[in-house]
Image (tube, helix red, strand yellow):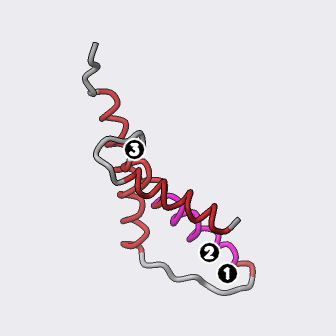
Amino acid sequence: MIKFIKNKIMAILRDMFKDNNNINEKSVVGFASFAMMVIFAIADIGSGVFGKDLVINEFIYNSFVIITLGSFGIAEVGKIFRKTEE
């Protein structure tokens, strides 16, 4: 079962870095950045429950926000201005 999962993950990674693929790399980067922001939020709430302050530098969090917005924005603009071949 573990070998099957490992093979599936490796196949996705191999396909992701091909020149012709169906995976939008900008969306993958945007999702990873958004997931990191969600992890920060959950950790902040969790540490707040125990009375501790989770210190996250503002520029690090803002960097994730910019990466997320930029990745999703570029991906959507690419969809809008993509030339359709007929």
The answer to which of marks 2 and 3 sits earlier in the sequence is 3
Question: Which residue: 50% across, 58% down?
Answer: 34
Give neighbour class at mark 3: few <14, some 14-19, many 20+ (Cα, 10 Å). few
Q: Nearer the viewer, mark 3 or mark 1?
A: 3
Q: Horizontal and vertical percent for residue 80?
A: 32, 27
Q: Does 7 appear above or below 23?
A: below
User: Helix or strand or loop: what does disc 1 sit on?
Assistant: helix
Residue linked to disc 2 = 44
Residue sitting nearer the eye, 33 or 19: 19
Q: Are marks 1 and 2 in contact (CB under 8 Å)?
A: yes
Q: Name which residue type carries label 1.
A: Ser
Question: Which residue: 36% across, 65% down?
Answer: 63
Which quadrant of the figure contains the N terminus?
A: bottom right
Q: Disc 2 versus disc 3: distance between alpha carbons?
A: 31 Å
Most common secondary structure along the magenta stretch: helix
Q: Horizontal and vertical percent for residue 77?
A: 31, 34
Asked which quadrant contains residue 83, the reply is: top left
The answer to which of marks 3 and 1 sits earlier in the sequence is 3
Q: Horizontal and vertical percent for residue 82?
A: 28, 27
Residue sitting nearer the eye, 63 or 31: 31
Which quadrant of the figure contains the C terminus?
A: top left
Give neighbour class at mark 1: few <14, some 14-19, many 20+ (Cα, 10 Å). few
Label of residue 24 in the image: 3
Q: Disc 3 versus disc 1: distance between alpha carbons?
A: 35 Å
Label of residue 83 in the image: none
Q: Name which residue type carries label 3.
A: Asn
Asked which quadrant contains residue 58, the reply is: bottom left
User: Helix or strand or loop: what does disc 2 sit on?
Assistant: helix
Q: Is residue 18 left or right of residue 5?
A: left
Q: Does 52 appear above or below 34?
A: below
Question: Which residue: 60% across, 84% down?
Answer: 53
Q: Name which residue type carries label 2.
A: Asp
